[in-house]
Amino acid sequence: MFSGLPCVENGATDVAAAAATSGADAAPALPSTCPASRDELRDRISAAVARRDPNALAGLLRWNGVSGGAAKSRLHELGELAQRPLLGIEAGALAGTSSDTDAGGDALRVRTGSNESGGVREHTFGISASTGCFWLTW
């Protein structure tokens, strides 16, 4: 479910708790904490693409202020990005910024694809630090 609210605020905590205690065989557990560093954020992007898991990529994004229509478009782009082999993740500055050391200028460029699978996909995400966590921004 997509929502602009934290689970606690929209009552979705009961759903997550029920899923966690269902007893059904499940895939290996994903990290339950947010990325605490840029390196961990990059590692989680790499793991999500290796699993071809656009939902894991979506879980690394800040969704504040994103409408339903925009969210659908972004999820579609994440799906396309995640369906190809990872070619590389490069750190740098966002266009129009002069430094890659301040939080507003940080960026990660994610490239996926190959000559055999329809070309290369690339997206440059911003990085936002908030309450000890590092998030991708659109």
Image (tube, rainbow, N blue to C red):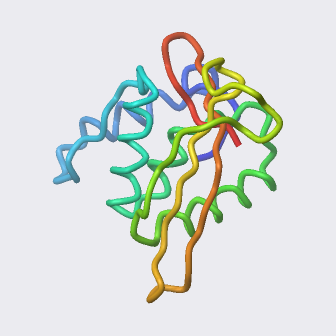
Residue 127: x and y in percent read 61, 31
Q: Quadrant of residue 2?
A: top right
Q: Residue furthest front?
A: 98
Q: Quadrant of the C terminus?
A: top right
Instruction: Classify 9 as above or below 23.
Output: above
Vertical order, 107 against 13 (above or below):
below
32 or 93: nearer the eye? 93
Give the x, y percent position of residue 51. Answer: 33, 60
**Residue sitting at 59 percent across and 15 percent down?**
130
Question: Residue visible at 33% across and 60% down?
Answer: 50
In this rendering, the answer to whether 80 lies above or below 69 is below
Of residues 55 and 81, the one nearer the viewer is 81
Residue 89 in percent (x, y) is at 47, 50
In this view, which residue lies farthest toward the bottom? 116
Residue 117 left/right relative to 77: left
Quadrant of the rendered structure where residue 34 is? top left
Left or right of 41 on screen, residue 135: right
**What is the x, y in percent for residue 119?**
56, 81
Q: Residue at x 60, y 20 (%)?
A: 101
Q: Is residue 100 left or right of residue 26?
A: right
Foreground residue among 23 and 90: 90
Q: Residue at x 73, y 31 (%)?
A: 64
Number of residue marks: 0
